[in-house]
Amino acid sequence: MTKGEYIELNQRRLAGGNVTPDVMGKYHPEEIARWISSAFNQIIFQLFKKNIRDLDLYTKTYKNVAVLYDTTIQVYYSLLPAPIIQLPNGKAIRKISYMSVTNNMPEYTVKIVGDNEKSTLSRLEVGNIDTNTWASYNNERIEYKKLPPDITKVIVKQVTPFYAYGLEDEFFMPAGTDIEIFRMVREFMLGSPPEDIVNDNNAKQV
Amino acid sequence: MNDLQYIINFVNFILNKEQTGRSVKPEEWNIIFPYVNFAYFKRKFGLTEEFKPGMPFSKSAWEVVQQITDSLGVFKVIMGDTNSPMIIDSDGHADKPSDYLHVSSIRYIKVTNDANCGVDTRLTPIEILTDAEWAHVVGSRIRPPSFNYPVAMFQNTYIQFLPKNLQYVEFTYLRTPVTPVYAYTLNATTDEVTYNQSGSTQFEWEENDISDIIMMILEYCGLNLKEDRIVQLSELKKQTGQ
């Protein structure tokens, strides 16, 4: 299902059928997307604890992510193409590889390490021997070490939160968890107090 | 049945009045008809007087059942579709139509290029906000107005839209009913009233609604003529619909 379809399914369930503009204030698609995101994050974290390899099933691929140069600290970097789910041990970005791959060259994968590790390794003997590109990242950007100068674009595969998908993007939930996610969303949204529909400068809602 | 003279004849029949007797004068029909026209419209659309605190619902409401949609459908105007849409200026303002009475829906046609270099056209509903909600929604970090989720707010003579550059929207509304006019000539000698059908403006309602309109007319005629039985009868018919 696409992101838009997931949202509409929840909206229809909450509204009891066809969704009219009247109920947009109560069950807005963007709000539902945020709640689905929160519920999905819980599921992904449980998955992360069980089998980290399964996270690859829920990654989104971003091509042609530009490599930029920070002249202030002389570092090559790329801005994150989308927000990431905050997973422990930096496992939200599953893979970074060079965009340009020819038939004679294997796919070059960047080694993802921690920021401190990147700094330490670069000062050890391994830093001179290892020809791989290293990268570390935070919530804003990916920073590279030993990036070949002719690499101007990379491919990033990361675990992106639900709300950052486009409405027409296919979104995949772990099998058997979609009902749980819908249930959580309904609990989030139906437990709120009634809307104050009277414009009378009075905070009382009932 | 949907002819003013027929309605007058039927009302006089119930009132058991002769044309020249103690009955409603011809010019008084042009006082009754416009009022009943609007009163019936209001009843069909929904009476705010029936709202209860915390429950703003009336017994009858626009499009709550197909029958009401059919009754009021003659007053429905669509700006858009095969007609000219509602134009929005650079400030996000659109003038209300001069015959506007109630809004039914507002839609924005979002046109985007799809992955195959084609055009994707999607109708997006526009949420109507109150004054109290406007500031919160416009400043919202989660759901600000956008081309995916445009919003509107009704002002005195215009409608404010956001985003401002929507350019045009489809606007469906209920217009003011045309005022029915009973045209006649009065013989100065005999006081005989001659109905002028071609010069009259009829009720626009469907045949199905005319019986209810007649009951409303009877109620007011009964009050005017101090006929309590007529008032009670029309009230009963209003309750039972038969």
Image (tube, rainbow, N blue to C red):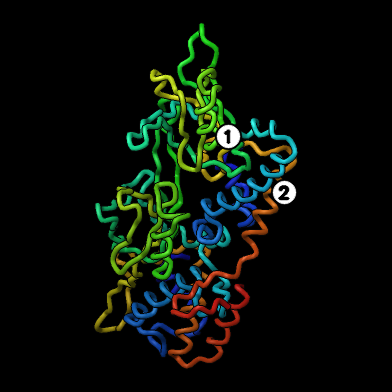
For this rendering, which residue is in front, A93 or B140? A93
* Camera sees residue A91: yes
Name which residue lies at 40% across and 44% down: B109
| Sequence-first tag of 1 and 2 | 1
- Real-space Cα separation, disc 1 to disc 2, in angstroms: 19 Å
For this rendering, which residue is in front, B46 or B36? B46
Q: Position of residue A195 (x, y in %)?
A: 54, 69
Q: Position of residue B60 (x, y in %)?
A: 55, 69
- Quadrant in the picture for the C terminus of chain A: bottom right
Location of mark 1 (residue) = A170
Q: Position of residue A154 (x, y in %)?
A: 46, 25
For this rendering, which residue is in front, A110 or B191? A110
Name which residue lies at 56% across and 82% down: B235
A59 w.r.t. B56: above or below: above
B142 w.r.t. A66: above or below: below
Name which residue lies at 28% across and 78% down: B186
Query: Looking at the image, which residue sits at the far top?
Result: A104
Location of mark 2 (residue) = A180
Task: Specify the amino acid type for callout 1.
Answer: Glu
Query: Mark 1 falls within which chain?
Result: A
Determine the image quadrant of residue B160: bottom left
Q: Is residue A50 left or right of residue B80?
A: right
- Quadrant in the picture for the N terminus of chain A: top right
B100 w.r.t. A41: above or below: below
SS for dot 1: loop
Q: Residues within 10 Å of mark 2 (few under 14, many from 20)?
A: few
For this rendering, which residue is in front, B70 or B2? B70
Query: Mark 2 falls within which chain?
Result: A
Q: Is residue B175 left or right of residue A87?
A: left
Determine the image quadrant of residue B33: bottom left
Q: Position of residue A141 (x, y in %)?
A: 46, 38
Q: Is residue A192 left or right of residue B130?
A: right
